[in-house]
């Protein structure tokens, strides 16, 4: 990861290496399915697509800005207190987002409710600050933040899609399973509403991804 | 670099400066957004109170509609004693979270009196515990003081898709026309029950599958607030108030002498608002 910092000045704004910062977390280095981070929120808020989307937007904002701030301060932050320093920055950002939403986008803030606060505890945020922003320049750090939140959001929405469709017959709050199905005896799958199902779904996604991507399979001993 | 980044002095200075900068930022944002936030919350509360009588308004129009519709307010103790009668401002500002933590007998429950299309409704502010956190809502009773007209609920953190569904209209509309008092005049409240565990009746509502604990909390909340209001309605019936100036617009079906003394205060507002009442 440190190699990005090398020939910074000559690199184009969207060089191949930098595009990879965004595309990698979507596939081979997905924060949820490969690094297994952010699982907690993947369980909690994927019953419906809407909160999942809002959660993704919140995380996108916080990681991108958090990465930027930490990257700007990376040479000032003392090693011994770096985790706490990162935490203060993240918590501050999240609180600011929360207040601004409440003041100017009250309806969206109602939708997000507790999830805004939960962003602080999202392991991906701290993970990216610690693993990337602490050692890279601001612009690549921001790209890395965008990439990782996209990768996170993709899994979140995918899981929420399956759970909402099978669990309540809806997509993004709109009824898609026609009433005729219910009249014929079709029932919504209540199991899909339970948190463990999200874990099973994430497991299935990991399984599919690994079977398609040989490089992710660990060597057998 | 002359500065030793790992020295204690640097670490402490850095931490202090960082925390100070973040605090100043937070305080600044807070003071900028504070007024808008509390205004938003106030308007939302007005919207919720109005929604309990089936009046849906935009947030911008909430205040005007609220002032027009809510003609009176009073607070009830758990035993149905009236307090703070007519002080709309004070009743609106009652914080139920604080009231519920007060000792037995000192709690005050807000009741708003609404007038819509010449009918009177009593809107009960409620708050209770769901599965994870607080639940609250507004339930309106018709002027007979025992039939539910409409209900609106909200919650802080019930499970999305399960307990959280209590705020959805498909659930709240089940409360309409339920009764809190049975044929013999005894208090029964309205219970949220597990589907099929009791025959459907005027006194129960089917809960949400998978949201049983939220439903139980909801039942307990309804019981506590309905019971205070039932005690109050008994007192009103016993007092059998004399009606003065009966030239007020009376809904022949629902408004009876029991509620007359409460409407009295709002008569002026009432007759004024009936002329140009466009809310429905």
Image (spheres, coloured by chain):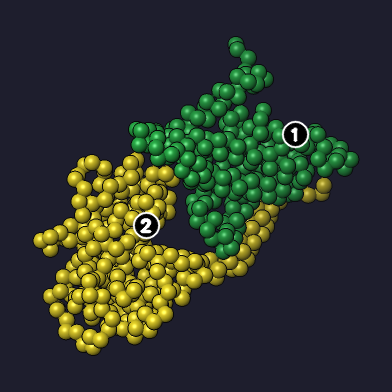
Q: Is residue A67 visible?
A: yes
Q: Which mark is residue B153?
A: 2
Give residue B230's position: percent from left, percent from top: 20, 66
- Name the colour assigned to chain A in the rendering: green
The residue sitting at 26% across, 67% down in the picture is: B142
The residue sitting at 29% across, 56% down in the picture is: B175
Give residue B8's position: percent from left, percent from top: 68, 49
The residue sitting at 65% across, 18% down in the picture is: A214
Q: Which mark is residue A20?
A: 1
Q: Which mark is residue B213?
A: none
Give residue A64's position: percent from left, percent from top: 68, 46
The residue sitting at 37% across, 57% down in the picture is: B153
Q: Secondary structure at mark 2?
A: strand
- Mark nearer the viewer, 1 or 2: 2
Of all chains in the rendering, the one displayed in yellow is B
Instruction: State if disc 2 and disc 1 touch (CB < 8 Å).
Output: no
């Amino acid at each position: 990861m440190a190699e990005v910092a090398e020939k910074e000045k000559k690199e184009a704004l969207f060089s191949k290496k930098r595009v990879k910062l965004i595309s990698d977390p979507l596939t081979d280095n997905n924060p949820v399915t490969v690094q297994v981070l952010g699982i907690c929120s993947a369980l909690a808020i994927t019953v419906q697509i809407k909160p999942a989307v809002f959660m993704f937007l919140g995380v996108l904002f916080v990681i991108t800005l958090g990465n930027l701030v930490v990257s700007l301060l990376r040479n000032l932050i003392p090693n011994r207190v770096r985790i706490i320093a990162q935490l203060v920055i993240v918590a501050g950002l999240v609180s600011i987002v929360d207040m601004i939403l409440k003041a100017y986008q009250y309806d969206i803030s109602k939708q997000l409710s507790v999830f805004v606060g939960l962003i602080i505890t999202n392991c991906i945020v701290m993970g990216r600050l610690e693993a990337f922003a602490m050692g890279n320049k601001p612009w690549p750090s921001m790209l890395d933040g965008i990439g990782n939140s996209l990768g996170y959001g993709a899994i979140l929405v995918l899981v929420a899609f399956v759970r909402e469709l099978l669990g309540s017959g809806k997509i993004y709050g709109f009824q898609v399973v026609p009433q005729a199905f219910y009249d014929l005896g079709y029932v919504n799958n209540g199991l899909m509403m339970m948190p463990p199902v999200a874990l099973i779904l994430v497991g299935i996604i990991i399984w599919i991804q690994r079977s398609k991507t040989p490089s992710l399979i660990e060597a057998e001993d | 670099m002359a500065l030793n980044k790992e020295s204690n002095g640097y670490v402490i200075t850095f931490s202090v400066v960082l925390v100070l900068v973040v605090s100043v930022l937070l305080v600044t944002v807070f003071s900028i957004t504070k007024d808008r936030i509390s205004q938003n919350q106030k308007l939302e509360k007005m919207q919720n109170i109005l929604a309990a009588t089936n009046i849906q308004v935009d947030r911008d129009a909430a205040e005007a509609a609220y002032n027009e519709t809510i003609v009176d307010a009073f607070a009830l103790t758990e035993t149905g004693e009236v307090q703070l009668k007519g002080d709309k401002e004070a009743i609106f500002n009652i914080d139920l979270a604080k009231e519920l933590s007060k000792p037995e007998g000192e709690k005050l429950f807000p009741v708003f009196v609404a007038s819509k299309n010449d009918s009177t409704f009593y809107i009960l502010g409620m708050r209770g515990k769901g599965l994870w956190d607080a639940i609250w809502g507004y339930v309106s009773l018709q002027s007979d003081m025992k039939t539910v007209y409409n209900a609106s609920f909200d919650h802080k953190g019930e499970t999305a898709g399960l307990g959280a569904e209590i705020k959805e209209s498909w659930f709240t509309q089940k409360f309409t026309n339920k009764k809190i008092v049975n044929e013999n005049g005894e208090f029964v409240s309205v219970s949220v029950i597990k589907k099929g565990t009791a025959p459907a009746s005027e006194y129960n509502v089917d809960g949400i599958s998978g949201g049983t604990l939220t439903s139980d909390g909801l039942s307990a909340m309804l019981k506590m607030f309905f019971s205070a209001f039932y005690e109050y309605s008994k007192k009103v019936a016993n007092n059998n108030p004399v009606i003065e100036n009966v030239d007020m617009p009376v809904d022949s079906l629902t408004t009876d002498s029991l509620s007359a003394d409460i409407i009295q205060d709002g008569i002026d507002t009432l007759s004024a608002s009936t002329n140009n009442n466009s809310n429905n």
